[in-house]
Amino acid sequence: MINVFRKGWRPASVLLLLFILWEVAVAIAEVPNWLLPPPTDIVQEAISGWTGFRQHLQSTVMLSLLGFAIGTGIGLLTAVLLHLLPFIRESVYPLLILSQNVPIIVLAPLLVVWFGFGILPKLIVITLVCFFPITVAALDGFRQTPEELKHYMLMAGASKGQLFWKLELPYSLPSLFSGLKISATYSVMGAVISEWLGAKAGIGVYMTLASSSFRTDRVFVAIFAIMLLSLLFFGSILLAESLLIKWKSRESARK
């Protein structure tokens, strides 16, 4: 985690350079603000409109966290069942892959028709985009357990439950956290898409209102807020990984 912060100045420098080029290019080309506002105008709008934007941000954060928690639970439970019951995995796993080929933006209106405009269809959208990376990552992690260690524990008299909890699950944690990092960023995207279904508040609602009124600066405020939220969620999972998987952190530090 420390190494990540030490190397963070490089992408930050590139990002700052891009913002400077953006500011200069817009000024030289005299691009109208409604078409492409400069970064300084976007920052000013973010500061001046913070009071009104805050409630939308809070709504998206809460929806993302709740959907991510549900998606994580369902994804991990699905992975455990498919791992422990191979005959179910052979039957269900192809269907899980097919489920990811259905565009969420197409499925979302159907969820509104089926479940109304409440929070349920929004949580379903976030769960659908979150559970699959976790399921696949956990299954890969379970399969990466060394066979010699399995044989050793079985020879020592370990049951299947002990084999799973004491060996297979710990060995799957690095892969599981990879899936969690992907799902954490997807949860924000899923929340914004779900808010387009007819929510009363949220970044998706804020973005829709800004776009319909040609407030491009507010649209960019929403875009940058989504990016920052995704980075914050990703960093939180990364921090949890470094705390829970100490041996991997030590190996990364030595590299």
Image: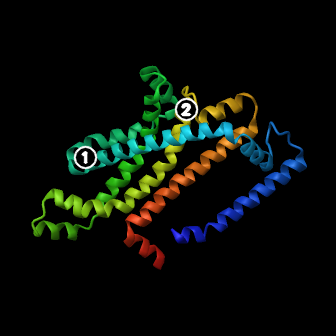
Q: Secondary structure at mark 2?
A: helix
Q: Secondary structure at mark 1?
A: helix
Q: Is residue 230 left or right of residue 112?
A: right
Q: How is the image coloured?
A: rainbow
Mark nearer the N terminus (1 vs 2) = 1
Residue flagged by tag 2: what amino acid is it?
Glu
Crowding at dot 2, Cα within 10 Å, few <14 / some 14-19 / many 20+, comes out as many
| Residue 51 percent across, percent down from the top left | 68, 39
Name the residue at 71% across, 28% down: 212
Instruction: Please tell me in which quadrant of the rendered image residue 149 appears.
Output: bottom left
**Label 1 with label 2: CB-CB less than 8 Å:** no
| Residue 153 percent across, percent down from the top left | 16, 68
| Residue 42 percent across, percent down from the top left | 76, 45
Q: CA distance from mark 1 to mark 2?
A: 32 Å
* Front disc: 1 or 2: 2
Name the residue at 49% across, 23% down: 117
Residue flagged by tag 1: what amino acid is it?
Leu
Which numbered dot is residue 81?
Answer: 1
Name the residue at 75% across, 42% down: 48
Examine the rendered structure and indicate whether residue 88 appears above or below residue 250.
above
Examine the rendered structure and indicate whether residue 47 appears above or below residue 170.
above
Residue toward you, 218 or 144: 218
Residue picked out by circle 2: 195
Q: Is residue 77 left or right of residue 107?
A: left
Q: Is residue 245 left or right of residue 236?
A: left
Which numbered dot is residue 151?
Answer: none
Crowding at dot 1, Cα within 10 Å, few <14 / some 14-19 / many 20+, comes out as few
| Residue 136 percent across, percent down from the top left | 37, 50
Examine the rendered structure and indicate whether residue 214 appears above or below residue 85.
above
